[in-house]
Amino acid sequence: MTPTREKLRIVSVWFPDLAMDRWRRSTMQQRSLPDDAVPVVLADTGSHGPVVHALNKTAQERGIEPGARIVDVQAIHPDLHVEPADPRGDQVLVERVALWARRWCPWTVRDGHDGIVMDVTGAAHLFGGEAALLRDIALRFRMQGLNTRLALAPTRGAAQMLARFGPGNCICGPQDLAEYLAPLPVVALRLAPDTVRLLQRLGLKTIAALREVPRVALMRRFGKLAEERNPLVLLDRATGRVADPLNAPPDERRWLARSRLPEPVIDPVPHLTRLTEDLCLQLSRAEQGARLLRLIIYRVDGEWRSREAATAQASRDPAHMLRLLSGKIEGIDPGFGFDLLTLEALRVEPLGLQQDQLDGCRDAGRDVAALLDRLSARLGPGKITWSGWRESHLPERLEHQRAALTHVPQDAPELLRERPLRLLEPAEEIAVLYAVPEGPPARFRWRRVAYLTTRHEGPERIAPEWWHDRPGTRLRDYYKVEVGDGRRFWIYREGILGDGRGGDPRWFLHGMFG
């Protein structure tokens, strides 16, 4: 049951240096950090080149601001150290932190791109009170290398405002709410920039000044704005006049099967059958199929060993899972034995209940997927590949190889029906002995053998892809030619006379038919 609004206690955690803290943690694991006296910035893509996304304390002291162009900053500060930013990775970290923070309370959500919000109503006494709870939160995040600013208040809006614009690490009670919010700037309400500029031109720069304005006047001026941009609505939420519930998403479901053994054993194979059957039963009830499995064996000496197996298609066949895992545990060192095994489906996909065919025929698609799984498990996930297709007319760019377990095979483009299946990589240059005007060579030499052209078809002109190729790249004219012994080749002329992109055209053999 959701607590009543009058008794709510909300904690807002803001990570003011999230991007730099995450970069610092990852860099320390790979190499040493730059000296503290060196200004460090993280660069992100801007409309006119790389711009400053985040910066360290030294860069802030030199007056560098987020959003500045990297080239301009480097001209002023030659010793600037620039690293690439990773906004997507920062968002993933915040999402993971929001789930990890449920160690303090069950209701936690992400707050924008650099914070989280927690409803700790009824949970503070478990940690020795509200002050001790805030100290514990700050300490544990500091141990993870993340700087924080915290605030605890009766409403979510007030906690967010105090964490970002308040004194920091403050505890606000219901009776002190108006006093704590009064000196904060109106931008703390998270208003649109044009609304903030309008309020400041009207002389309403603080929350106290905004609250002194009659509500009728504010509603008349901002009533047409959406609730998320209306300063009056946002102020009512922050002060508790309007309810602002915290809707925390449910915990991500884990598909996990365990096998606890009364005594340590050495061979895990006899216990895998029950594990796979238990996991597949869970998946079947939810109409899900596993794409990635992880088996963990816990030894009696406190060590553990894990093995993973991926599938080309979603599966909940216990026999198939057993075959995949059996080939991966041969090299596991059991030590003095193990007493716990877990099998978890790390990635699942919807897989509806299917009825077997009435004629007794097997599904060829399932057999191929099972074969790919077994080959990939034995040879490695990158050894078995499918052909993938890109949007391109150039033969060498049209096809590429992707891992079979991570790529669903696609139908070949219609264009391939008119092209040879065997291509030379790269195309080999041929010597033209005699050329037909505006046609293929009548005689040419390839690999020190001379050929006489008996028939030809073409040309097929392929222009350069200006969004990929360098300036000056020449077009190609492809011909299908048949020589005296019946073999058919695919050759092309690179460039034409007078195109202004080089000298005489060059000829290449790119593939063979049949």
Image (tube, helix red, strand yellow):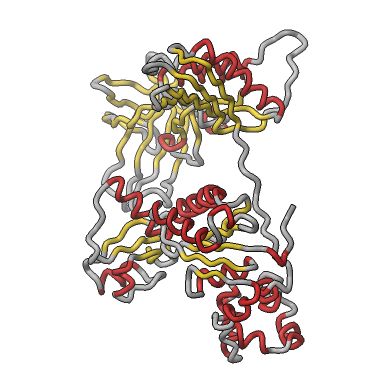
Q: From what the image shows, is residue 309 above or below residue 270?
A: below
Give whichever of 409, 240 is nearer the camera: 240
Q: Is residue 114 visible?
A: no
Q: Give how far across and how far down residue 128 sits, in percent.
A: 53, 57
**Residue drawn at (61%, 88%), measured in percent from left and top?**
209
Q: Can residue 120 be seen in this view?
A: yes
Q: From what the image shows, is residue 443 above or below residue 101?
A: above
Q: Give how far across and how far down residue 183 sits, in percent.
A: 55, 83
**Residue drawn at (30%, 63%), measured in percent from left and top?**
40
The number of callouts visible is 0
Which residue occupies the extreme top position in the image? 360
Residue 453 is drawn in which quadrant? top left
Residue 409 is drawn in which quadrant? top right
Q: With 98 as the anchor, is 286 left or right in this view? A: right
**Residue drawn at (33%, 65%), measured in percent from left and top?**
56
Q: Give how far across and how far down residue 383 sits, in percent.
A: 41, 23
Q: From what the image shows, is residue 68 above or below residue 93?
A: below
Give whichever of 124, 294 is nearer the camera: 124
Quadrant location of the C terminus in the rendered image: top left
Q: From what the image shows, is residue 307 above or below residue 161?
A: above
Give whichever of 200, 46 is nearer the camera: 200
Q: Give how far across and how far down residue 465 sits, in percent.
A: 43, 48
Residue 51 is drawn in which quadrant? bottom left
